[in-house]
Amino acid sequence: MVTAEDELIALDRAHVWRPYTSSEDHENRRLLVVERAHGPWLITPEGRRVLDASGSWWCNNLGHGHPRLREAIARQAEHLMHCTFAAATHEPACRLAAELVDVAPDGLRRVFFSDNGSTSVEVALKIAFQYWQQNGRPRRKRFLSLPGAYHGDTLGAMSVGQVDEFNRVFRPLLFEVERPPDPIENRWEPVFERLLEMIRKSANELAGVIVEPVVQGAAGMRMYPPELLARVREETKRVDTFLIADEVFTGFGRTGPMWASEHARIAPDLLCTAKGLSGGMLPFAATLATDRIYDGFRGDKRRALMHGHTFFANPLGAAVAREVLAIYRDDQVLEAAKEKARKLATAIAAMTEVAGVTAPRALGMCAAFDVGAPGYMGSLGWRISDVALDLGAHLRPLGNTVYLVPPLNIEDADLGRLLEIVRESTERVLRTTP
Ligand SMILES: Cc1ncc(COP(=O)(O)O)c(C=O)c1O
């Protein structure tokens, strides 16, 4: 009998072009059909409940279908779903901008909206570049970034990124960006020493330095000491160039504090946010900038930032983002997540009891371990994810890195179940792997 799920999978395989997926994997790898979702649970048309371990690509910070977020979207939809932002404005966007400035690191007082993490990065790069062009330092055209960086899939964001599997084929289209070599055995000190040297050496040509603060997501949930980020902040200040913090993944409490930059007690000049900004409900993003940067665009028409998107400041996205901020305030989400983060860290540390597991790491509600040589193409993580799906959790490994980014407000029992499934699926696969 052909079920509703079979039919949808057949349609998907016939007509959808999947992200990051070879046609072979698309045709052969299992596909989870999701009809509904609630809290950390994805629910199939047949009513099977599966835990969403990847936070639906790292954005679902408050659980699926949060009643307040659903209501906020419905309320806003009654009034205004979208309208131009060309010489027009609306309440959700203005109030959200002010509320974001309130929770942002010091000095970030201007908000430029867009609709996904990659565009928020493109905007930051263009702002930094144009600022120097029209403020007396036109030689400042270059950017520095970190090894293994990932900042999105549009061409500018890819240029500052380095995950080889994403970038290799597009290299001729990307602009040149320098970065230090990869850490050896996770020793980050030499990487940052080299970065500081590069900043000093190229200061006169440097439009900015872009980093994922403290956790590099797509590189395999790699974590580096916040003190090193603090030193980059110091050096960028000393040579007077911009530090861009890409908090698309790490923002909204994913690593503990509201922004991962807070681990290093720094405030960047530009900050990119998306994903958790809308609670993972709608495509929505923002790039925040200091007054100094904004002021560098004052003057006649030719000094304006010539960038914008049709759905700039979309009212539904802005309304849901405002409600996200209200929930963080009312439910003290960050405070409440601390105990869950401890539980997650303890369970991940204990994963080394499983032979073959290495490098357990956790920060806030983000945890990972490796089951083989890191790298996006490793296959052991996928075998673990297949077993986990049978046991009731949807993992999306980064090659041989298995990671968990559950909602910050996940119920303790659900977190406990997720950790049991991860342990059991890892044990089963590694036991049978030579
Ligand atoms: C640090 C970082 N920057 C940018 C992006 C791109 O965001 P989006 O997929 O919304 O374009 C991502 C996505 O995972 C990310 O992790």
Image (cartoon, rainbow, N blue to C red):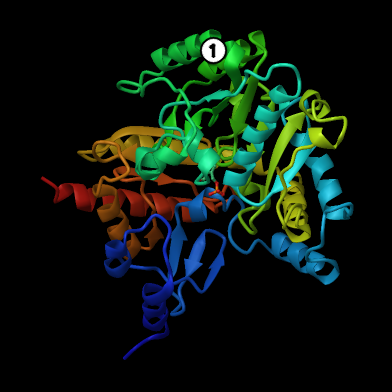
What residue is at 27 percent from the left and 64 percent from the top? Answer: 24
Give residue 103's quadrant in the image.
top right
Pointer 1: what residue? Answer: 202
Q: Is residue 266 left or right of residue 216?
A: right
Can residue 97 be spotted in the picture? yes
Classify 39 as above or below 358: below
**Residue 235 placement (x, y as % from top left):** 59, 11
What residue is at 28 percent from the left and 59 percent from the top? Answer: 387
Can residue 343 be spotted in the picture? no
Classify 38 as above or below 373: below
What residue is at 54 percent from the left and 67 percent from the top? Answer: 37
Farthest-out residue, front: 302
Image quadrant for the C terminus? Answer: top left
**Residue 47 placement (x, y as % from top left):** 46, 77
Q: Is residue 3 left or right of residue 119?
A: left
Farthest-out residue, left: 434
Q: Nearer the viewer, residue 162 or 74?
A: 162
Mark 1 is on which residue type?
Ser
Q: Secondary structure at mark 1?
A: helix
